[in-house]
Amino acid sequence: MVDLDTREWLLTNGLGSFASGTVSDIRTRSYHGWLFAATNPPSGRTLLLSHLEASLELSDRVVALGTNFWGSCQIEPKGYELLRLFDLNPVPKWIWGEDDWQLTRRLVMPYGLVRQRGLGGFPHERLPNPEGVEKVGQSTEASPDSLTPTSPPFHFCHRMLVQYRYEGTQTAILKLRLLIGDRDFHHQQKVIPELQFSQLLGQQQVCLQAISSHNFGTPWHLRWTQGNYQPDPFWYLDYKLPEETLRGLGDREDLYSPGYLTVTLSPGDAVTMDARVGFPNELETPLTCETFTELVEAEQQRLSQVFGWENWQSEAKEDNTLISSSSSPTPSHLWRRLLQAADQFIVYRASIAGPSVIAGYHWFNDWGRDTLIALPGLTLTPQRFELAKGLLQTFGRYCSHGLIPNAFPDADGEPFYNSIDAALWWIETLGLYLEATQDWQFLVEQYPVVQQIYKAFIGGTRYNIQADVTDGLVSWYAPAVALTWMDAVVDGQPVTPRRGKPVEINALWYSALCWASRWAEILSEHEAMVDRGRLAKQALRYTELAQQVKASMQQYWNPQLGYLYDVIEPDDLRNSQIRPNAVLALSLSHCAFSQQQGQKILALACSCLLTPYGLRSLAPTDPEYIGKYKGNPEKRDRAYHQGTVWSWLIGPFIRGWERFYPGLPLPFDWQPLLKHFLSDACLGSISEIFEGDQPHTPRGAVAQAWSVAEVIRHLKNY
C-alpha cells in the first residue's frame, strides 16, 4: 500500500444511501462501493453496485484502469499508476492518462427525497418534477429541514450516475465490466450455490436482481447513453479488504459480474450510466450526457438554498479551481465545505416519518445522544432552524418514562432507551434552540416533555435512574449496561461502567433544572397558558432543586488534583481518573463551578487531555490508559474510552475556556484539525476518533457528525 493513496471519499443522498471509495480507486473496506442503497431509510443499507472495472482498448494496446487487492496480497491490475489527478469538488473525479490519451470519470449521487407532482413544496424548497431530470430551478429534490409526518407524499430515489469522458489522438474502445452484489453493508459477499442473479436486458438498460433460496433481493436497473451490453456471467473471487484485516474482521469478498458494456469513443465523447433502485419505469426521462451536469448543478443549488449561499454557480467554480491547486481554501470556501460535510449526516427516517442524523459513516446508524450533541453545530449555527425544530420534535415525541430514545428501530417496534443522558441533552439543546429563535410557542408545545423528564428523574425510571433525595444528584445502577456516552461493552461487561453519579450527567441535570425554572417563569406570563399560578410554583420548585444540586456538585471537587471526580460510585467512593467529563461539566449553558475551580480544571485538561485533534478520553498517566486504537473488535472497544482522542470534545473545551478564561487566547491551534478535514482520512470530513499517542492517527468512522458539528459551532469565532 506504499504507493497507493487510500484516503477516502464519501457521497450521500439524504436517505442513508451512500457511495465511498479511495483516491487511488482501490477498495479497502467492506463499505467501499458505488451504490449502498438504504432500502428502509436510513437503514437496510445494501451493496448493489460495487464498481465498474474499466479498460481502454487503443490501436496498439489494451490499458487496464482498475486497481484491486486480491487474497494473495497482489495488486492487479495497477491502474493507479496511470492516475494523473483526483478532484473532489463538486463531485469525485479521476483522470487517467498517458501521452496520447486521457479518460475522466465522475460520480454523482442525487438527493433521494423526491416529491410527487402537483402537491406543492416544503417551506423554502423547490417544486419537483416526478422522476425527471433535475434541471436547475426545477429540482425533484426536497430537504428534510421541514419534513414531518404530515408532509405531502413523496417517494425515495436511490441512484448513482457515472460518466466517462475520453480525450485522445485516436478512437478508443472503453470496456466497462459490472461488479455487483446484494449483501448487507457490514458483511462481505461470498459465492454460495443458492445465490443467483437474474438480468433482463432492454433497450440500453439492464434490470438486475439477486435470488437466493426463492427469496428475491433488491431490484435495480442500469441505463446508459451509448454502447453495447453483453451478458457474460462470472464470479470474481477473493478480493482482499486490508482495512478490515486491520480491524480484525472478515476481509475477503467475492463479487458477481453479470456482463460488460463496450463503448466506442471518439476524442471528446462521453458515456453516462445511471444505476437506480427499482424496476425500470416508463416515466423516467431519457438519459443523456447532459443529465450528469444537470444533476450536479441541482445538488449545488439545493445546498445553496439550504444554507442561503448566493452566487452559488460562480462560487462552485472557484471551489473547483481551488481544490486542484496547492493553495489553501479561503475562509468562505472552507466554511462552505464544512456545511456541505454537515449536510451529509442529515437523513430522513422512514420508520418515524421525520428527520434524523446519521452518527457517522460508514457503519453507524442514527443515535439520539449523538444527534442532540451535534444539533447546535449542524442546525443552529447554519440557521437551519426548521430542521432543528423537526429533530427536537421527533425525539420529544418518543419520550417514554422520561427517557429520550438513543436509537430507533428499523421497522415496527419500540425505540431503544439505553441512555441516561439523551433526555438531558434534549433539554439542553431545546434551550439553545429557544435562545436562538425565541420560539416560545414551540416551548408551549414541548414543555410537557420537559415536565415528563423531570418527574421521571425525580420519581425514578428505567435502569434505576433517580435523583437522590439527600443531595438532589442523579444516580443510576444497572449491571451489564453502559448508559453514558462512554458506552463500550466487551463480553457483556461495560469497559467504563460509570454506575452511580457521573459528573457530566449531574452537570446536565443542573443545567436542565435551570432551564426548566426559566421556562416555567416565561410560560407563567404566556397568554396561551391557563394555570399561570401553578407554573410560578413550578419555577420556584425547579429553582430550589437547582440550588441544592449546585451545592451538591461540590462533592465532585478533588482539591488534591484541582479537578473533578469522574463518578461518585454507588458505594460513595470517588473515581479520580482524569477524564474529559469534567470539561463537559464546564461547557453547558449553566455551570455549577466557580471561576477558580473552572480554571484549575481547564489547566489540568490542557496538560493531560488536550491534543491537536480533540481531548483524550483518559490521561496518559493513568494505569488504564491505552494509547493505540487497533486490533480486533475487543481490543478496539477496550481502548475506545481509555485514552482515545475524541474530536467532538474540542467543542466543550472551547466553551469552557471562553467561560473561565474570557479574553485569553485559546490554547488550541486549528490548523492540524482543519488539515485533517481537507486532506486526510475522508476528504472533506472529520474522523470519529484519533489515537491518544502521537502522531494521533485517525481511527474509527472516517466521517462523524458531532466531530464536524463542533468545528462548525466554534470555528467562525477564531
Image: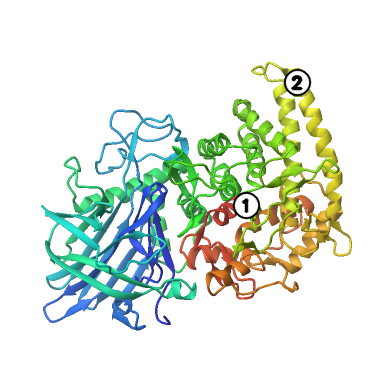
Instruction: Report the disc number at residue 467.
Output: none
Instruction: Report the disc number at residue 534.
Output: 2
| Count of numbered tags | 2
Residue 187 in the image, given as x and y percentages of width and height: 39, 64
Q: Residue at 85% x, 61% y: name it.
A: 562
Residue 278 in the image, given as x and y percentages of width and height: 25, 48
Badge 1 marks a residue whose secondary structure is: helix
Q: Which quadrant of the figure contains the N terminus?
A: bottom left
Q: Is residue 92 visible?
A: yes
Q: Is residue 308 visible?
A: no
Q: Nearer the viewer, residue 417 or 16?
A: 417
Q: Nearer the viewer, residue 29 or 528?
A: 29
Residue 626 in the image, given as x and y percentages of width and height: 66, 73
Residue 620 relative to residue 15: left or right:
right
Q: Mark 1 Cα within 10 Å, few/some/many (few <14, many 20+)?
A: some
* Residue with the mark numbered 1: 714
Q: Seen from this angle, which residue lies furthest front? A: 213
Q: Earlier in the sequence, mark 1 or mark 2?
A: 2
Residue 410 relative to residue 507: left or right:
left
Write down the quadrant of residue 657 in the picture. Answer: bottom right
Q: Residue at 57% x, 53% y: name it.
A: 706
The answer to whether marks 1 and 2 mark residues whose Cβ atoms lie closer than 8 Å is no
Select label 1 or label 2 by which is in front. Answer: 2
Q: CA distance from mark 1 to mark 2?
A: 39 Å
Q: Amino acid at mark 2?
A: Arg
